[in-house]
Amino acid sequence: MQKQLQLQERPNGLPDEHTFSTKEIEIGSPNDNELLVKTLYLSVDPYMRGRMSDAKSYIAPFELNQAISGGSIAEVIESNVSSIPKGTIVSGLLPFQEYVVVKPDQVRTLEMHGAPISAALGALGMPGLTAYFGLDDIGKPKEGETVVISGAAGAVGSIAGQLARLKGARAVGIVGSQEKVDFLVNELGFSAAINYKEDNMEEALKQACPDGIDVYFENVGGEVSDHIWPLLNPLARIPVCGAISAYNLKKGEKDSGPRVQTYLVKTRARMQGFLYGDYADQYEKAYSELSEYVKNKEIVFKETILDGFDRIPEAFNGLFTGKNIGKQLVKISDPS
Amino acid sequence: MQKQLQLQERPNGLPDEHTFSTKEIEIGSPNDNELLVKTLYLSVDPYMRGRMSDAKSYIAPFELNQAISGGSIAEVIESNVSSIPKGTIVSGLLPFQEYVVVKPDQVRTLEMHGAPISAALGALGMPGLTAYFGLDDIGKPKEGETVVISGAAGAVGSIAGQLARLKGARAVGIVGSQEKVDFLVNELGFSAAINYKEDNMEEALKQACPDGIDVYFENVGGEVSDHIWPLLNPLARIPVCGAISAYNLKKGEKDSGPRVQTYLVKTRARMQGFLYGDYADQYEKAYSELSEYVKNKEIVFKETILDGFDRIPEAFNGLFTGKNIGKQLVKISDPS
């Protein structure tokens, strides 16, 4: 028997003790052309909150009393697929359980080029690709420009800031603690960082962005971002990756603030939602650039890892309460 | 002597009797390589409200106790420029006065291909180009898509809707009177029109857009647009041309509503301010297409014309109180 994490109740606000339930299910065994994999790491990501509600979005909601699924790294422990031998490390979007029977097209074999396998869920996985395409297609930072990143210590934001820096732009991060401020400036090479919980946002932004804001990489939404609009430069670009501050609003709570239209008109700014999956035809280029940066230590990545299947809910909620620095992972087991 | 319209006081809210003053000034006479032109039509446009405040924008504020300027059509009545003979009809961004001494590079000679000269301030001028580039570069309506236009009976909106229709899209207009609803549906070929002052916006939009909204051509901002975001389709495009509802807010009044970020994330929609002047390298293509449509009556345009220099303030304020259908002009004098 093994554990599986199910969605028991759709949360109203932040997930609580009624949201998830852990069920004991059978491990199952692989048929022809199937693999049995053992989960090593699971990824918790803010977008998963959207799947816990039943609102229409770009990805289907999780079903009640079914497994939650998400980014996963696993080891093949039984193989009926000749091209993927036992011992292969794979990743995929898999149900959150300790063992999974999969078809070969549900996973990809990891080639880490020296990086730890967990990076396949962070800098060299969905978050890294998200940062990459948000900047490459929408943000387009140029040398000397100012790029502000909210949620800048998170899995996506920390990579986005470093990619902006590598393009010769000034990266300015917005985060929620002094520890994160120090991390951005001292370890990731951000030009400045602001603690929105302590600093006067209006003054701090003006000081950190004396030449205005050319790119705003949006991860958080809410009041933090309301302070950005008045500082936008002409032809500014705003890749909208997420709006984490609004994901846990309770029914009836409103996400309201200054409307953006007059700012967009005055600056001819472009504000655009995006999804890394829309750029599947460019994954190879992105992986290869990101891998090279990681190998050369031009991009530093950090992980916050909780240990044990039972800590998935705690890890997930930590994303919304500022607990993680870098990529939040849950370690399920060691490789054989 | 002649009349000149000056900015006397920066308005707080809608311009009032203190905002403008009419001064008597000398007519002046042209030097070498100059022209004396007589004003025939003046254009009043919503963007001019922005120039009456001293806030930073894409175009410099009007100066106090100096002439207001704007789109103008004029006749050359004295010429010291061999290539532009007396009697030529020209247009340009000129001070609002009855006669102006200009250099030849301040004006362009009109070639109307059979259209009335006033069209050079509307369908075949700045408003037409604005509609054209907003759709051509950002909106990109495709056959069968639903394009919603706010301010749809105005100078820009009425052209935008017709251009969308000519691309095979369904044009749905939002306006503020039954007369305008009828105008859009019966004269301009819109598929549907909504009166935001009478209709229940949420229900009316759902009914007019059963397949959701692919393009929202934004002219008005405010509460009207708040109803658009929940109906956006994946990969929707939102050219933000203006936000007229917010132009006359008084000091301290807030333009607040639902934040757009979560909608943009869910749909990967693109929302972008733009200015026709950024597309100067494509004017020829745009003029030629628009002229052809007008000539073939595939685009119908309407004008609301007030008569007399003293009616400029009334014409201007009418833009914000829904008085005009189509392009609002002020006629100053007849051609010789």
Image: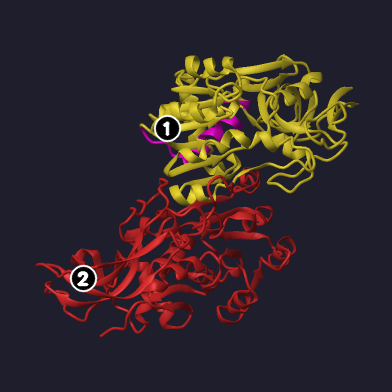
Chain colours: A yellow, B red
Q: From the viewer's perspective, tell me whether residue A178 is left or right of residue B310.
A: right
Residue A316, how many percent across, how many down? 73, 26
Whether residue A118 is visible = yes
**Which chain is indicated by disc 1?**
A
Residue designated by label 1: A146
Considering only vertical position in the picture, is A214 above or below B257? above
The residue closer to the viewer here, B137 or A113, is B137
- Disc 1 is placed on an element classified as strand
| Residue A307, horizontal then vertical, whole percent | 74, 14
Which residue is at a point 57% across and 56% down the rendered structure image? Answer: B221
Q: Residues within 10 Å of mark 1 (few under 14, many from 20)?
A: many
Residue A275 is one of the magenta-drawn residues: no
User: Which quadrant holds the N terminus of chain B?
Assistant: bottom left
Please state which of the two labelled residues, at mark 2 or mark 1, is closer to the viewer: 2
- Residue A132 drawn in magenta: yes
In terms of secondary structure, where does tag 2 sit? loop
Residue, disc 2 = B27
Write the residue at 72% across / 20% down: A330
Residue at the limit of the structure toward the left, as seen here: B32
Left or right, residue A65 beside residue B333:
right
**For the magenta stretch, what is the residue range?**
A121-143
Residue A209 percent coordinates (x, y): 43, 30
Secondary structure that dominates the magenta span: helix
**Residue, x 74% and y 37% (percent of image)?**
A249
